[in-house]
Amino acid sequence: MPRLILSHALLPEGWAEEVLVVTDAAGRIEAVHPGATDPSAQREIGIGIPGLPNLHSHAFQRGMAGLSEHAGSAEDSFWTWREVMYRFLARLTPDDVEAIATLAYAEMLEAGFTRVGEFHYLHHDADGRHHADIAEMAVRIAAAASATGINLTLLPCFYAHGEVGGGAPDPGQRRFLSDRDSYAALVAGSRRAIAGLPGARLGIAPHSLRAATAGEIRDVMSLAAPDEPLHIHVSEQVKEVEACEAILGRPPIAALDEAVGLSPRWCLIHATHGTSDELRRVAASGAVVGLCPITESNLGDGIFPARGFTGQGGRFGVGTDSNILISAPEELRVLEYAQRLIERRRNVLAPRGASTARTLWEAALAGGTQALGAGPAGLVPGAWLDLVVLDPHHPALAARQGDRWLDALLFAAPHAPIRSVIVRGQAVVTDGVHPLRAQAEARVGRILARILGD
């Protein structure tokens, strides 16, 4: 698809018609020409918008979606959900992980995501022993990305402890654990796994201050190239905040900043319970906050104070995290609706006179692209041609133009009117369906019948 004309497209400067996009052989954009005519170009009748980055995914958790929605004998929380997750992953083989990731990535593409940041911590065999190739699970993640066509930023996770301050890990965490030397081998293997994958990037991900000490975080950061991203879970749970204050003498984001220094390379996943001072530091540093509104709602984590953060120039992106439900529009819708419930007013995250949907989409595009180390964002020269094409005939989009299309996509379309998706200049979704979806669903169905039927 070296030359493509879009009947309508969202460019950084706004909406344009008859947009000619010229790409190189790899799928990078060389030029964008609004108002163009070119009889030799392929023509796409539809509404073209940049695909969103999904900056935080645990792909294997798609297989356990819905398994923790039964009230327990004690009060349910993230911590009781985690026990369900440990029991589920104890049965997964490398083949299972690849199959579930393939289905999850196909669904992401259908739902408007064109790059995934796979925060990958399920490394080892069921008994905790290393596979013959320590990066076997990373190889399977890369295979799923290759099969589906989604861009991948692979984030191998360093996980050494169970509690803040270097506490002993839980038995359920044995498949995650690394020491500094084995993690270096894992990172090297992960680099090999993505070496032949077009558009792929690598980043370094100390799991959290529960799973890594400050010294270990500094050590593993040294394994990253200067332009590679750094990701960490932080301030997700009140219990985590209280433990950091008790053991480290400060809350998690402050402790991280003082230990390693925040910068635009960092993506802080959740940051739900950051203090106003901590979030001021994050905004000033240029780091990205990785919000996962559907998962955070499902787990009862709390609500991130997005209005105050973005008002200070804070950057954010969105991720699907537990993958209980995969939808780019719904992540942004839940984010905005949560703010409305706090503020008791409407259109909280948009400047006066602006479209809420466009504000959210463009902010998540910029923040997610930065967080995943993916280069320029949007339909601009140097970026990948990663494009979501909306069906202009869908009832939710009828009689609308410009920003109203995005408003309808986010707030008025229970079934996203996504007709096709293009990644690196290649069509990966046609007529709303990924070609691997049926096969992947059947394969995952057999896996779940084995795991859940025993």
Image (cartoon, helix red, strand yellow):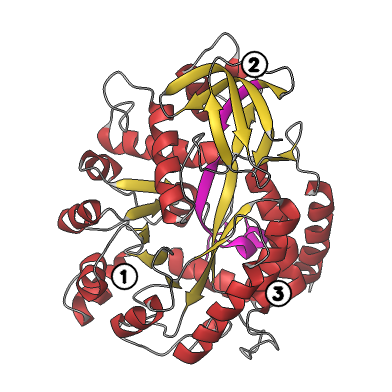
Q: Position of residue 51 (x, y in %)?
A: 56, 39
Q: Which residues are magenta?
A: 46-72
Real-space Cα distance between discs 2 and 3? 41 Å
What residue is shown with label 2? 395
Secondary-structure class at tag 3: loop
The amino acid type, in three-letter code, at marker 3 is: Leu
Residue 58 among magenta residues: yes
For label 2, count other residues whose C-alpha is less than 10 Å away and answer few (under 14), some (14-19) or many (20+). Answer: few
Give me the disc on residue 239: 1
For label 1, count other residues whose C-alpha is less than 10 Å away and answer few (under 14), some (14-19) or many (20+). Answer: few
Asked if residue 416 shows in the view, the reply is no
**Mark 1 in CB contact with mark 2 (< 8 angstroms):** no
Question: Which label's residue is closer to the chain start, 2 or 3?
Answer: 3
Q: Residue at x 38, y 76 (%)?
A: 221
Asked if 1 appears above or below 392 in the picture, the reply is below
Secondary-structure class at tag 2: helix
Q: Residue at x 42, y 28 (%)?
A: 358
What residue is shown with label 3? 92
The amino acid type, in three-letter code, at marker 1 is: Lys
Q: Which mark's residue is nearer the viewer, 1 or 2?
A: 2
Q: Nearer the viewer, residue 145 or 163?
A: 145
Q: Position of residue 74 (x, y in %)?
A: 46, 68
Real-space Cα distance between discs 1 and 3? 29 Å
Asked if residue 208 shows in the view, the reply is yes
Q: Nearer the viewer, residue 437 or 315?
A: 315
Secondary-structure class at tag 1: helix
